[in-house]
Image (tube, rainbow, N blue to C red):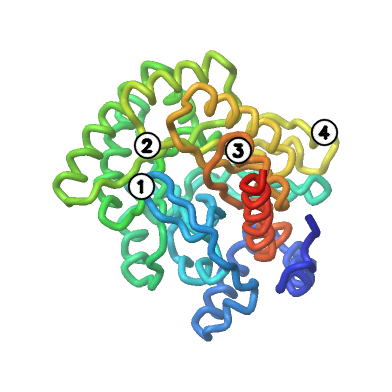
Amino acid sequence: MSKPDSFAGGGAYALARSLLFRLDAEHAHALTLGALDGLQRLHLAHWLAPAIPPLPVRAFGLDFPNPVGLAAGLDKNAAHVDGLAAMGFGFIEVGTVTPRPQPGNPRPRLFRLPGQQALINRMGFNNDGVDALLRNLDRAQYRGVLGINIGKNKDTPNAQAADDYLHGLQRVHAQASYIAVNISSPNTAGLRDLQAHAALDALIGRLREAQERLGAQAGARKPMLLKIAPDLDGRDMDDIAEVLQRHGIDGLICTNTTLARDGVAGAAHAQESGGLSGVPLRARADSVLRGMRARLPGIEIIGTGGIDDGTAAVQKVAAGACLVQLYTGLIYRGPALIAECVQALREAADAARAH
C-alpha cells in the first residue's frame, strides 16, 4: 500500500507537518485543530482530504458509512467535530470527558518520537467537563456516528468511581451514538485498577443497569463499549471477558496506550512517563485484540493502536476487529491515511469475497 502522496492532500500535509513539528507538540495540536476549524468555516476543510466512497459497516446496531474512525483523545471537548468530520471519518469518538472540568497533568505532557512514528502522552484527562462538551455538540452540525468516551475525575476515589461514570453516562446518553467507558488510561493514578475482576464487575453491573434504564426511558438503546489496556496478560483478559460476557456488554475497544517501551529504546523522550502510542504499540494492541476476540467471539470490537497505513488497518480486521480507529498515525500521515485505510479494507473485503 503506497504512502501519503498516493492520495489527495498527502503532499500538502507533509509540508504542514514539517512546520508543525518545529513547535511544541501540544501547541501544534491546538494550532492544527484551530486551522481545521477555520477551513471548515470557509467550507474548505474537504480540500485536506480526498472524497471517500462509502464502505458501509453495521456494528453495535449502528450503521457506519465506512469502518475508519477517529479515536478518543484528539478532540476531548467535542470542539472540532465538524472540521474533523470533513476529513472523511466513518465515525468520530470524542472525550475522554469527566463530570467536572480538570486541567490534567502539568506541561510538557505530550512528546513526539518521529523515528518510531510514536507519541508519549501523560495528558491526564484534561477537559472542560461534560457540560461544556454537550454545549459544543449542540453547536455542531455533524449528524454521523458519534462515540462519547467517559472517565472519572482525578480526585474521585476508585470506591466512588462508578458515580462519575454513571453521571457521564446519564449526561451524554441523548447525544451519543455509543458510549465508551475508559478505565484504561495510564495517566490517571489508579484508574487501571478498575480493570481488576471485582472492581470491573461492580462498575459494569451498575453501568449496564443504567444503560438499559436510560434506553427504555428514551426509547433508544445506546450501545456501551469498554476501552481496555494493551498491558494485560492472559489471566487479566480471562477476568475481563468473564465480566463482560456475564453482563452482556455491547463491545470493546482494543486498546489504549501502553506503559511499555518496546521498540523505542534510546529514542529522545522514550523515558518520559505516560502512555506510548503509534507503531511501537501495534504488536501489543493486536495481541490483546486477538486474545479478546478468542475469549468473546460474539462481541464486536473496535481495533486501535499502531495503524500507520492501510496494511495495518487490514491486520486489525484480520485479528478480529469490525471497525478501526486512528490517532497517532493521523499525526504523522495526515488525512490521506483515512482514505488509504478505507481503500485497503475495501480491497481486502473484495478479495475475501472473490475466494
312 displayed left or right of 255: right
Disc 4 vs disc 1: Cβ atoms closer than 8 Å? no
Q: Which mark is residue 250?
A: 2
What secondary structure is found at the residue carrying circle 3? loop
Q: Quadrant of the N terminus?
A: bottom right
Q: Amino acid at mark 2?
A: Asp
From the image, tell me which residue sits under label 4: 265
What secondary structure is found at the residue carrying circle 4? loop
Q: Quadrant of the C terminus?
A: top right
What secondary structure is found at the residue carrying circle 1? loop
Q: Earlier in the sequence, mark 1 or mark 2?
A: 1
From the image, tell me which residue sits under label 1: 61
> Given the current orientation, which residue lies at the most extreme top position?
235
**Marks 1/2: CA–CA distance:** 9 Å
From the image, tell me which residue sits under label 3: 257
Q: Nearer the viewer, residue 343 or 219?
A: 343
- Labels in figure, total: 4
206 displayed left or right of 128: left
Q: Earlier in the sequence, mark 1 or mark 3?
A: 1
Q: Amino acid at mark 1?
A: Gly
